[in-house]
Amino acid sequence: MTALSSPHDRFFKAVFGRTEVAAEFLARYLPPAVATALDWETLRAGKDSFLDPGLAQHPTDLLYEVDLRGGGAGYVHVLFEHKSYVESRIGLDLLRYRVRIWEQWLNTGHSGRLPVIIPVVVYHGAKAWRVSRRFADEVADVPALRECIPDCVYYLIDLSRYRDEELRGAVMLQTALLTLKYIFRDDLRERLPEILGLLRELEQSSSGLDYVVTLLRYLAQGASTERLDADELRRVATAVLSGGGELMMTIAEQWEQQGIEKGIEKGIPAGEVLLLRRLLIRRFGPIPGWVETKLAGAEPAQLEVWGERVLDAPLLEAVFGE
C-alpha cells in the first residue's frame, strides 16, 4: 500500500478506518434509500488486496463489506479527496476499482451474480465540486450507442456544502467532520474552540486519548500557519481542554512543558509521544533512559510502528526492535 504522506490522508484513515465511525457516517450521509438497504451493524473492513495498488494517487481508499437487508452481501468503497482542485477523471478511477474488486471476488472462488459495490467520494477541498457523478458523462455522447456506455454513478459527500448543524453524530464523527470542513478555511481559528470543546464528552479511555491525539496532530500538521499558528493552537487547546478531565489536562500540561512548536517543527505533537509513553508504562512498568531517548528523537512514521507493536509485544525490547 502507498505510504500516507499527507496529514489529511492519515487523519481520514485513522478516523474512518474505525468501522463504528464509518458505519455511522455512511448511514447518516448516504441517500436514505441507499442507507436503509444496508445492515450497518454488519459493516466490516474489506480486504486490502481488492484495492488496486497501481492507483497510487488515492492511498486512502477504504473498502468495507456489508450485508444487505434483503439478503446477500455487498461492498462500500470510500474514496477520500482533499485536493485544492477536483480530479476530473475520478469516474474512470472508480470504474477501475470496481472491476478490480469484482475480479478479486471471482478469484477467491465465488460464483453467481457479482456483488453490488457502492462507490462513495468524500470531499473537503477548497474549490466547489463540479465534476459529474456519472461516468457516462466522461464518454463521447453518440445517441445511437448510449446503451453501450456504463452509467456508473458514485455518491458524493461534499462537506463544504453542509451547515455546521447538519454535521452531527457521535463525538469522534462530529469533530472529525467539522475539522475536515474548516481545515482549508480562513475561519478555522474561530471555529476551533467549539470543535475542541466537543472533546470533553469523550470518555477518559485509551481509545478516547488516541482519538484526541489524532485530532490535535492533524490540526498541528494539516492547517497552514496563516490559518492557525502554533501559539494560537496551544492557547486554545490549553484553555478548552484543561478543564475537560485528567486526560485533557495531561496533554495540556505536556504542551506547557515542551512547547507545541517543537512538535510541529518535527511533525510530532507532544501528545502523541505522551500517549505512547503511557501505554509503554502500562504494559511494561517504568521505562529506562534508552527508551526516553528513542521517543524524544522519533519521527512520526516510527512512532506509528511502535504504537502498533506495544499492544502485542512480549517484551519492551520487542517494541523497538528492527
Image (spheres, rainbow, N blue to C red):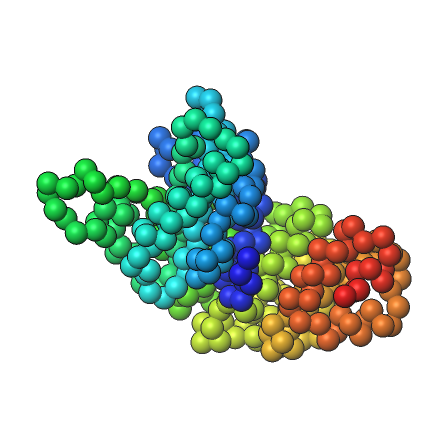
From this viewpoint, which residue is outermost toward the top? 70
The answer to whether 289 is drawn above or below residue 159 in the figure is below
- Quadrant of the image for the N terminus? bottom right
Residue located 71% across and 55% down the image: 308
Query: How many marks on residues?
Result: 0
Pick the front one: 247 or 269: 269
Pick the front one: 297 or 181: 297
The location of residue 198, given as percent across then percent down, is 56, 51
Q: Can residue 257 be seen by looking at this rendering?
A: no
The location of residue 25, given as percent across then percent down, is 47, 42
Pick the front one: 284 or 201: 284
The answer to whether 307 is drawn above or below residue 152 in the figure is below
- Quadrant of the image for the C terminus? bottom right
The answer to whether 286 is drawn above or below residue 289 in the figure is above
The location of residue 34, given as percent across then percent down, is 38, 33
Residue located 27% across and 47% down the image: 135
The answer to whether 226 is drawn above or below residue 278 in the figure is below
Left or right of 92? Residue 314 is right
Left or right of 245? Residue 173 is left
Q: Can residue 152 be seen by looking at this rendering?
A: yes
